[in-house]
Amino acid sequence: MTTPPPWWDTLAAPGAELGITWLDPGSWRSADDLGSDYADSPRTITVAERTDRDADLRAGRVLVGTGPAVTTRAYGIDQPVHWYADGDGGLWCSLAPYYPAWLWVAVDPTADGLREVLSSTFPRRDLMRPDLVAAARGFVGYTNSVGVPNVYDGQFVPINGHDLDRYFGMMAYPMQNAWGSVHTDDPLRTDIGAVKPLEMMAATKGKLAQRLGRVPSMTWRMLQSQAYLSIEIHARQLVCAAVRYVPTPASHQATVRRVNADFETAYPEDLPLDVIGALTGFEWDTERTLAHNLGPDATVGEVAAMVRVLYALRHGDLGATLALRDYVRHPEAAVREAAVDTALWYGDTFMVYEALAAETDPELRAQLLSLIERGAPGADTYNAFDDYFSGDPIIVDGSGDPVEAWRDDSDEDDDEDEDES
Amino acid sequence: MTDDAWAHERTLVLADDARLADLDRYAAGRDWPRVTDLPGGYGYLRQVGWSVGAATVLWLESGRLGARFVCVAGPSAADVDPAAEAVGAVLPVVTEDATLAELTAAEPAESRTALRALHRLAAAYEIRRLRDMPAAPDDRYRLMAERVLAHTDMTVRHALMMLFADLMTVRPEVVAPIVAHADPDPGLAPLVDVFREIAVEKGIPVP
């Protein structure tokens, strides 16, 4: 394709104003043959279905423009927006060269359309947690089933902080350097250009620690949207992905609807595209996709497990958690126990009173009374990400003082671990 | 916030159907800047805050109490009252009067209702407890304690003693009826003794 589409001449001025460089039609390049100049890949887990879809969508599209760009933290590399035309007069926006085509956004080829599609990223300004007004959380799986690729050999290893940090550090979607729950906001500036690795190590020392009482988490800031993507481990075994973000423009939401339809996913429609890219290869289950676990055919064990997942998914929204109060009155003791255990892990001790008021089993009543009188068990000091920071604290309390973390990876089986929890 | 910024405080305890999004939308519509957003946790309140002139509006969630409340604080009543009235018009609130009425009614409330009411009262004074701020004397708390101690469900009586062991300096009216209480459940007698010891320790006059 070398014939300019009808809108071509009308976008020259607004494009220049927005930092877009339109390429001469003679140098347009096919989207499925960009060569080494654009060989960047997202470097995520490979999912065959998505790779195939990327290839299908690239066919017939050509790169017609680039820019504006975002500069990566620590490496100082510019990642320009890519603009593609298709053979049907359509214009597509890829927020960076490495975005697969299923994350491209269909653009209204007008000045307003260009501004709208770029508005989630440009003009650039630092966004901090109070600015990130939207929140979403998906259930990724259990710690004994969620794997992370080792960045050297690609083999999946059980989820742990070290490999997560290396994997997300290698991936293209996030900015460099994660932080633990000791920080509620990105502890590094977003405008750090290229820095020496040793300087970066010094700047990030201690940033991965966990704060006693908060859900253990590792958080990355996304490059284009500046959203915070956290991998959390709830109650020692439930892995969630939690996102704080600014809802995306309407044009991006159309892309997410298409992604959800094509890949049978359940991402919120206003979730930033770089978050969805970063989560490639991970599950994102929601209360809706897991609802069958509470259905009429669900076993008691499935319902009890689902209660734990519901607590995790609703964490941070006490109004939603309050709606789980009925589970402490559930006719099945296993479900009631799951509800109380989980509530206690989060420090929701009011649930114990509600459970006690409803409990008729003498043994369970005695346990609940004991829990109340001893006081709740206290915030968990489990080393959820199996971290080791060369002797630096893994968990600190509200004053910043180290708290002894523990982790028992001896040969106990899972049942014994559950009993201990 | 400085101490001066806490000179005046009003807490509004929210109904279960209150939505943060409603307050967020209202705040955005009036250009109240969102200045705080801290996650909750074990022993931590979730906090979302807006700056309203010299006052601060804080949406707070306590997992311990199972209650959500909004605290409006500022250097003067003139700073606090308009913002508190505005919040009360946007969000469904359970007033202290209504909660006390539930707990002092001639017909005792059902256990679950009584437990919610007790936790809501504790929420109403959570900020004053944390900041060691006194409250105006209110003899309805003495009656409330007497009525709750007569509740047939020991869970409710137990909750009263546990929750107000933390609040006795803010609401000392409950101390006399609790320390004078002879509970029919032998398991609760030690709790009364502990309550008395705490009161003595805190210098609260014990009959």
Image (spheres, helix red, strand yellow):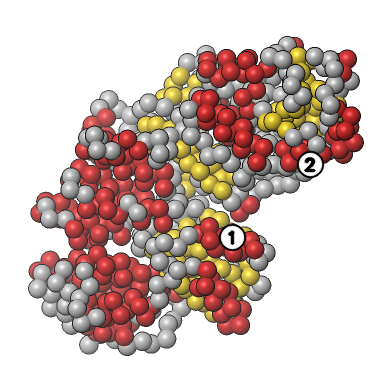
Instruction: Name the spot of residue B14 as percent of width and height, x first.
Output: 43, 67
Q: Is residue A119 above or below residue A413?
A: below
Instruction: Name the spot of residue A231 as percent of width and height, x first.
Output: 49, 37
Q: Quadrant of the C terminus of chain A?
A: top left
Q: Quadrant of the N terminus of chain A?
A: top right
Helix, strand or loop under label 2? helix
Please state the chain letter of the residue tagged with numbered disc 2 in the rendered image.
A
Which label is found at residue B25? 1
Q: Amino acid at mark 2?
A: Asp
**Nearest to the observer: residue B44 or residue A13:** A13
Q: Which residue is depicted at the point 63% across and 70% down? A: B52
- Closer mark to the observer between disc 2 and disc 1: 2
- Location of residue A355 by image quarter: bottom left
The reply to whether residue A9 is in sight is yes
User: Is residue A136 left or right of A309 when viewed as pictured?
Assistant: right
Instruction: Name the spot of residue A131 as percent of width and height, x first.
Output: 63, 52
Helix, strand or loop under label 1? helix
Q: Which residue is depicted at the point 80% across and 30% down? A: A67
**Nearest to the observer: residue A25 or residue A343:** A25
- Location of residue A350 by image quarter: bottom left
Which label is found at residue A112? 2
**Nearest to the observer: residue A152 or residue A315:** A315
Q: Amino acid at mark 1?
A: Arg
**Nearest to the observer: residue A208 or residue A17:** A17
Q: Which residue is depicted at the point 68% across and 17% down? A: A58
User: Is residue B152 left or right of A54 when viewed as pictured?
Assistant: left
Instruction: Name the spot of residue A11 as percent of width and height, x first.
Output: 86, 33
User: Is residue A85 left or right of A158 when viewed as pictured?
Assistant: right
The reply to whether residue A376 is in sight is no
